[in-house]
Amino acid sequence: MLYTNNMMKKQIAIFDLDGTVINSAHRTPNKADGTLDLTRYFKLRTRESIFKDTLLPLADRMKEMYDSGEWHIVICTAREMDQDDFDFLADNNLKFHECFDRNNVRKKYHWKLPDAQYKTKQLKKYKNTDYIFFDDAQPIIDAFGTYPNVTMIDATLENKRRAYA
């Protein structure tokens, strides 16, 4: 649980972006293990390309959780977010309370870490807090699935389930 400024208890939900709530496959080349190929990704990173992204079924869940007022929504992405990314989120009503991305790493050496290690470092403040984590990359699912305080959800499977529900 998280105590907010108004002392209301909120549950914590953490969402990855690419492949979890956003379909950016047209501009997010992945490696075989599902992690982002950053070199190729940066070449495809333009406002025009970002705004061709579409929402996946979990985007609706993220919106519902935020709108309920019962959840503290955190984005934790391997992306290096810029204003175009935040504009896309706003235009699509994807609201959040916190965002961890490669531009706001806790320590500079975290920037170059593999995704699972990077996300573990970024989310260190929640290490003693129960939370639910939605991610599509297998290394993240494997790592966070071992943490006793984390309910890990495979976003690929959950998006398929929601698409056919």
Image (tube, rainbow, N blue to C red):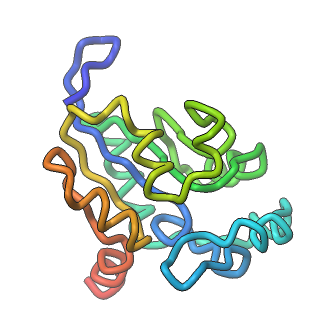
| Residue 74 x %, y % | 43, 41
Q: Is residue 153 left or right of residue 140?
A: left
Residue, x 69% and y 50% (percent of image)?
80
| Residue 83 x %, y % | 77, 43
Q: Nearer the viewer, residue 15 or 152?
A: 152
Looking at the rendered structure, the number of numbered marks drawn on it comes to 0
| Residue 78 x %, y % | 58, 55
Q: Nearer the viewer, residue 98 or 119?
A: 119
Residue, x 36% and y 29% (percent of image)?
125
Q: Is residue 73 left or right of residue 164?
A: right
Q: Quadrant of the N terminus?
A: top left
Q: Quadrant of the C terminus?
A: bottom left
Residue, x 25% and y 51% (percent of image)?
132
Q: Point out the residue furthest to the left here.
A: 148
Q: Is residue 144 left or right of residue 44?
A: left
Q: Nearer the viewer, residue 101 or 87?
A: 101
Q: Please, is residue 90 above or below residue 59 in the view?
A: above
| Residue 151 figure quarter | bottom left
